[in-house]
Image (tube, rainbow, N blue to C red):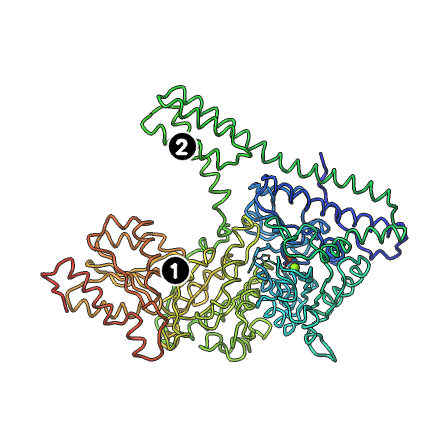
Amino acid sequence: MPETTMRATSKFDTAELSFDDFKKIVIDDYRIGYESRQASIIGRKEVLTGKAKFGIFGDGKEVAQLAMAKAFRAGDWRAGYYRDQTFMFATGMSNLKEFFAQLYANPDVEKDPSSAGRQMNCHYATRFVNADGSWVNQAETMNCSSDISTTGGHMPRLLGLAYASKLYRQNKELEYLKQFSVNGNEVAFGSIGNGATSEGLFFEVFNAAGVLQVPMAISIWDDAYAISVPAKLQTTKEDISEILKGFQRENGSNGFEIFKVKGWDYIALCETYAKAIAVCREEHVPVLIHVIEMTQPQGHSTSGSHERYKSKDRLTWEDEHDCLLKMRQWMISSAIATEEELTELENEARKYVRDCQREAAAELVTIVNAELEETATMIEQFAETVSVKDKLIEIATELRKSYDAGRKEIVSAVRKTLWATVKEDSTERQMLANLLKVEKDKANVRYNSKLFSDTPQSPLYVPVVPVSYSDDARSINGSEVLNACFDANFARDKTIVAFGEDLGAIGDVNQGFAGLQAKYGDIRITDSGIRESAIIGQGMGLAMRGLRPIAEIQYLDYLIYAMTVISDDIGSLSYRTFGGQKAPVIIRTRGHRLEGIWHSGSPLGMILGSMRGFHICVPRNMTQAAGLYNTLLRGDEPALVIESLNGYRLKEKLPSNVGEFTIPLGKAEIMTEGSDITVVSYGSTLRIVLEAAEELKNMGINVEVIDPQTLYPFDKEHVCSTSLKKTNKLLVIDEDVPGGASAYIIQQILEEQKGYYSLDAQPRTLTAKEHRPPYGSDGDYFSKPSFDDVVEAVYAIMSEANPAKFPAIY
Ligand SMILES: Cc1ncc(C[n+]2csc(CCOP(=O)(O)OP(=O)(O)O)c2C)c(N)n1
Ligand SMILES: [Mg+2]
């Protein structure tokens, strides 16, 4: 059995390094690199012979990663991409067995701690959330934020991870948080392919890091290709560090230190990384290490072969410049090792990797085969008792014969057995039905769990504190209620920070943060550049490192600019790490109707479709918003809060416990009681609906208006379907497009809450039009649901049900 203990790289920083010590370190490094290469070669074979589904590997990038690992310390962070297996092995953050367990999609989190079999291979993560929701001591561990497959998608997160070090260094009030930082000495290491630097996110983050001066070290693995597309078609001048030269800091300016080094030159790489990371760590200067002349010995991935698009000359060049080959030649010529010693090392390494691979494969296959055997036997025994014996024997035989069967084949065989025997009733059948239930429950945990971290610290379990008002409660602007809420929370919790465009000096465009920067300092309440993705990435990285960011997007319409980070990265984080990582960032924005195509959006359907993994809060006024912030800031899951853009100047009473009262997520509220029809609405539209309900009362119609307050989760206590039992009629009103969020709400009420059975009229929706809202009051009137529209929509449903009492208006 192979040992899969850590084979981490050693540093060269011993005070007196003898040549023998030096040799040993280099040879050990070569071993790690060579094993990593073998993992790539065997991994590819496993895919091409059908034993795994897809493979993408770090071959050709090994030597630079050995050098990078030498500069990486406990407390540091990585945000990289799918080429970094050598770095993960060399730091000890992963090992070969885990590499293969992930390749085989082993859903056991002990075997694949990065993703519990959920992610493709070479998508790494370390686990830093304990089962009870508490954090591991990140200052003592090496930390790897969870990889995503989208090229460049991780860059905003990298910025946030680095920015956390800046906050921990500059904000002395955070010194007590020793488990997250030691004086901000941690570097955030990023890696990205040369092709992916064409992405907007790369440039956005690069500029932001230069402005913010954060300890971020980006390595570009430049192999001159992005799948088949050569550098000529990707990068101006075919040279990314050349064109980024303007970012070089000079004469006391801010900016980057930029390095360029060849990917096969071990010594130059080690020296470059030592130098680059020292300045990054000590001075908090971002650094770029452009590693050129890298290769892809096996091509891009298992999906194709690079012989199709690389010239013969290029392929020959790649063979000659293979970084491990070059390192080997250098080791021999420098008398570090002999040809024979290296051949022996390579033979040992090949066997070792093969053993690791076989063991990882066997670990899954043995368990699944035992389950298969048990299931097939149960089906065969059941077959003996039924008239469709042949059919069941056929199912069992097929199951036994299936090549590389997984749980899919086992569960499918049981389901087909139950179909074939639907009219039978026996103990054997019941046993199979029970087995199916058990297996479905297990599959649910394996494949469908942990969208949220769902620990005792979830905002869903934050104790409810009712709002209270003193007898002489002042009526003030909504923005002032929010301001008081933020003030109280900033005073209570030193880890809370907020940033966004115009948030700092002027206190946001609608004054929710007015005066708070002066009170709490510009390190906690900060203006940001116009860079929505980077703002959200900043929030994500901070939240992963124990801070409580409120990341502000100026208007809801601009959320789209950050959607990749929100949807791909934050939204899937808990799921894709099986709860091993979390990023409880609160995204604050404002939206719904105001003026103009890009200042009146309410794209909740888009949000609901792409932001699962977030709590979606749509408060109708600022007091409700405050209660939701109070809940979210005490929980540990990500959320979006959309304030009503037209509500900041409306008067609201100031609660006496404005920073303490909490509104539970998923708590729908009945705004007005009525017995004729249930109307569900939220956000800015709700005020119009309430006014319409008053008018409708004059027409003899009693409307029950319900505000779900949060769309995700939606009305956990089924207030809506309970209301339907009384009214039997449903109208859903919002400002999204037809079939947008209203379709989701209808699905929740009719299907999820079984409201369908209470209906005696067609359920209806009243929404905005399909296009964006035009500028001006008339544009608003003719494209968003107006007071008149609401009155008529309710009336029409009543008229349909009882035309004698409510004759058609038109
Ligand atoms: C946003 C996004 N667009 C496209 C892809 C498909 N894709 C995967 S890898 C890749 C090429 C990346 O090239 P490069 O950044 O140079 O990295 P390399 O694979 O060469 O190391 C592409 C286009 C993706 N994963 N994500
Ligand atoms: Mg490339």
Type of residue at label 1? Thr
Q: Is residue 344 above or below residue 703?
A: above
In this image, 599 relative to 202: left or right? Answer: left
Label 2: which secondary element: helix
- Label 1 sits on a secondary structure element that is strand
Residue 805 placed where, x, y %? 10, 62
Relative to 376, is 189 above or below?
Answer: below
- Give the side of residue 387 with respect to residue 578, left or right: left
Q: Which residue is mark 2?
A: 416
Distance between mark 1 and mark 2 Cα atoms: 40 Å
Q: Which residue is mark 1?
A: 710
Callout 2: CB less than 8 Å from ligand 1: no
Q: Residues within 10 Å of mark 2 (few under 14, many from 20)?
A: some
For the C terminus, the image quarter is bottom left
Type of residue at label 2? Lys
Does ligand 1 reach within 8 Å of label 1's beta carbon?
A: no
Quadrant where ligand 1 appears: bottom right
Q: Nearer the viewer, residue 488 or 449?
A: 449
Residue sitting nearer the eye, 145 or 269: 269
Residue sticking out furthest to the front: 312
